[in-house]
Amino acid sequence: MAKTSTGEILGRYALSLAVVTPVLLFARMQLRYLLAARPEADWGVLLRARLLATGATAAILALAAQVWLPSETAALLALVGLSRAVEDVGDLLYGLRQRSHQWSRIAASQILRGLGGAATVIAVSLLTGRFDTGLAANLIWQLGLTLALDARGLRWPSGSWRAAVGTLGECWTLGAAAAVVSLNGNLPRYALEASVGAAAVGHYAALSQVALLGNLPVQAMGVAALARLGARAEQGRGPFLRLTAGLAAVSVAIGLAGVAASWQFGARLLALLYSPEIEALAASLTWMMAGALCTFLTAVFGYSLVALGERRAQLGAFGASGLVGLAACWALIPEHGVPGAAAANLLCWLAAATFSGAALWIRCKSLPVAISDCPAEEASSTLNGCSAPVRSSCSSAL
């Protein structure tokens, strides 16, 4: 689609995603991860909370788009928002499947949702000549997949709507942290649209899609490790930090591979995937890959903080990195365009990795030292600060 569509169309679509995604991520409130990592979490209450938050947010987005945006952009934003809202319901169902280790079912759904949705958009858009019709077809595809595959075999769970409202009140900081993370990633798009134009947003978005290919295995690794991270936190500081360090090492390796590949083969890859005007931005792809490396590391630290039940630290870390990104966008994008946006993206995520890593380290200091990490001659004594594995002091989110 990027080869046949104009930069203007791609830019409007990318800008719609940039507007919709932070808002819907706030509505998610990371409930899936709480459901997967916390056996005591009430599935019925979390489902009701997700329906309340996502439904209200999608309705507000659609209404706001019709009131304040041009008709073409409003239609794209409304369709993207509704599709993402349906996906968010399926996302919570993934958390339920994750509890019973139904990984093959989750993987099948994600493949059908991603590749099937993309194929639907492309095929219908080419057949009808209208991109918004392709997005409408994708909405139908996502809804059918959620009902036919994700929710198959499930019954409507018991639960209290009042408790669901209370859950939203308790978990809003997790949603705010996720929204700020998304805002950080989208700051260059907002700045490009304001100072350069929609076509530049489309070009930047095309580079972003390539740079974030490694995000798929990193996110899958983090989600799969959530329950283990929670269990390691109960065992003590050492086991938890060792698992986190292992995840971080893998994420850095994936990021370095992307940087090296873009350095050697970036121009050829962009020529294969995109139009010549995007191919000309090959030098910026390496900077985007470096930013992606920092994004992967930030994601690992974020999952570890979620496993510890930490909420406000994430919000503070990502808020501070957002200020760094805002300053970088203001300084670099008006003069340098897409290359400046790539550099600003790198600075923003480097700050995010630094601040979230510091927040995680501070939080880990409150974990008990595992008895396996004590000297053998002192393992039976608690005077040296070592103790038997104790449940971590995670605050309850429900």
Image (cartoon, rainbow, N blue to C red):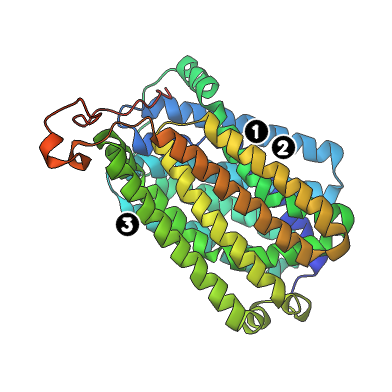
Quadrant location, the C terminus: top left
Image position, residue 70 (x, y; %): 87, 47
Image position, residue 87 (x, y; %): 53, 46
From the viewer's perspective, tell me whether residue 46 is left or right of residue 27.
left
Q: Quadrant of residue 372?
A: top left
**Badge 3: residue crowd in 10 Å (few <14, some 14–19, many ≥20):** few
Q: Name the residue under label 3.
A: 104
Mark 1 or mark 3: whose residue is earlier in sequence: 1
Q: What element carries label 1?
A: helix
Amino acid type at image mark 1: Thr
Kindly indicate whether the residue at mark 3 contacts the one at mark 1 (C-beta within 8 angstroms). Answer: no
Q: Mark 2 points at which residue?
A: 61
Amino acid type at image mark 2: Leu
Kindly indicate whether the residue at mark 1 contacts the one at mark 2 (C-beta within 8 angstroms). Answer: yes
**Badge 1: residue crowd in 10 Å (few <14, some 14–19, many ≥20):** many
Q: Mark 1 points at which residue?
A: 57
From the viewer's perspective, tell me whether residue 32 is left or right of residue 140.
left
Quadrant location, the N terminus: bottom right
Amino acid type at image mark 3: Ser
Name the residue: 61% across, 44% down. 181
- Please determine whether, in this image, residue 360 is positioned above or below residue 79: above
Q: Real-space Cα distance between discs 3 and 2? A: 34 Å
Q: Real-space Cα distance between discs 1 and 3? A: 31 Å
